[in-house]
């Protein structure tokens, strides 16, 4: 009806503002940048710990890239194209070249291979642009350190054809709100994360929790989420406003994982998806670290 059309126009206007220049507010993008950096660095540190322990055998300890999967890479490959991986690449480059307090042995990290998946593959020009951005995060890349990027069609809910634990790090931003079955998607992500210190980093929007003191004053937004959720799913590609996404992630990883970082925050410029959460969880069942 008329209300649905008006809401659709309102959402369309909001998305147009956000999409201008393929950018989001800095309060959101800074979380993507820092969360992805932390997830990738912690995964690299786990690889370092395994290399030092020597219990994987010499053959598996050969120099290799950090394997990263980005779920819901998007038509514009926003994270890569906007340079939001660069902080992580800078840190990994520093560690692999002997800088910093926690140098990674050269036998551990030869670079970073990032694979993005989505229901539709981005066009070739977008992928190439993302590759060029990643290749030179600050114009100072070691000849022995490489950063690669590719994107393929895939549905995380239906399952991907990779063996268990294929990726050192899995990442997503504003994706779990719209997957067909969120629990299945998170379980598939967990399956793909390396059980020996692999990480999952996410930045998502979520429902308001009025029972938490920091969010108890967001009653009107919580009411809007409940009221508008059915229309949001129709006009915004199955986007749900009331999913308790961070809790679902922590619950899925609780048996063999630890929470490295967690945050809930608001980005009012991104209404109606202004209530957001970010976090990094790490699978640690074989590293002897206390679980969640």
Image: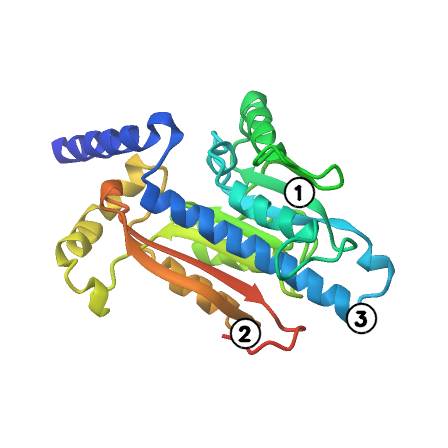
Q: Identify residue for label 2.
A: 255
Closest to the observer, 76 or 225: 76
Query: Do we see residue 233 in this rendering?
Result: yes
- The x and y percentages for residue 134 are 59, 35
Q: Badge 3 local density, few (<14 within 10 Å), some, or many (20+)?
A: few
Which comes sooner in the sequence, label 1 or label 3?
A: 3
| Quadrant (top left/top right/bottom left/bottom right) for the N terminus | top left
- The x and y percentages for residue 161 are 67, 47
Q: Identify residue for label 1.
A: 113
Query: Do we see residue 242 in this rendering?
Result: no
Residues at marks 1 and 2, CA–CA distance in whole angstroms: 28 Å
Q: Badge 1 local density, few (<14 within 10 Å), some, or many (20+)?
A: some
Which comes sooner in the sequence, label 1 or label 2?
A: 1
Which residue is at 22% across, 32% downward? 8
Residue extending furthest toward the top: 125
Q: Identify residue for label 3.
A: 55
- The x and y percentages for residue 270 are 27, 42
């Amino acid at each position: 009806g008329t209300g649905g059309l008006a809401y659709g126009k309102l959402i369309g206007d909001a998305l147009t503002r956000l999409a201008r220049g393929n950018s989001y507010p800095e309060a959101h993008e800074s979380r993507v940048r820092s969360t992805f950096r932390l997830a990738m660095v912690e995964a690299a540190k786990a690889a370092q710990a395994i290399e030092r322990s020597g219990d994987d055998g010499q053959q598996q300890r050969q120099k290799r890239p950090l394997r990263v999967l980005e779920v819901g890479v998007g038509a514009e490959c926003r994270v890569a194209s906007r340079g939001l991986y660069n902080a992580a690449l800078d840190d990994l480059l520093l560690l692999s070249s002997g800088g910093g307090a926690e140098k990674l042995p050269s036998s551990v990290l030869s670079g970073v291979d990032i694979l993005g998946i989505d229901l539709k593959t981005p066009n070739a020009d977008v992928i190439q642009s993302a590759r060029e951005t990643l290749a030179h995060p600050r114009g100072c890349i070691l000849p022995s350190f490489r950063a690669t990027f590719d994107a393929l069609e895939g549905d995380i809910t239906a399952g991907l054809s990779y063996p268990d634990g294929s990726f050192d790090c899995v990442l997503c931003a504003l994706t779990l709100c719209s997957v067909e079955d969120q629990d299945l998607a998170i379980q598939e992500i967990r399956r793909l994360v390396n059980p020996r210190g692999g990480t999952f980093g996410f930045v998502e929007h979520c429902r308001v929790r009025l029972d938490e003191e920091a969010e108890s004053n967001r009653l009107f937004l919580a009411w809007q989420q409940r009221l508008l959720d059915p229309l949001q799913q129709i006009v915004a590609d199955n986007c749900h406003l009331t999913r308790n996404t961070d809790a679902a992630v922590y619950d899925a990883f609780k048996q063999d994982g630890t929470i490295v970082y967690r945050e809930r925050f608001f980005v009012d410029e991104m209404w109606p998806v202004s209530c957001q959460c970010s976090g990094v969880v790490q699978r640690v069942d074989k590293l002897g670290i206390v679980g969640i």
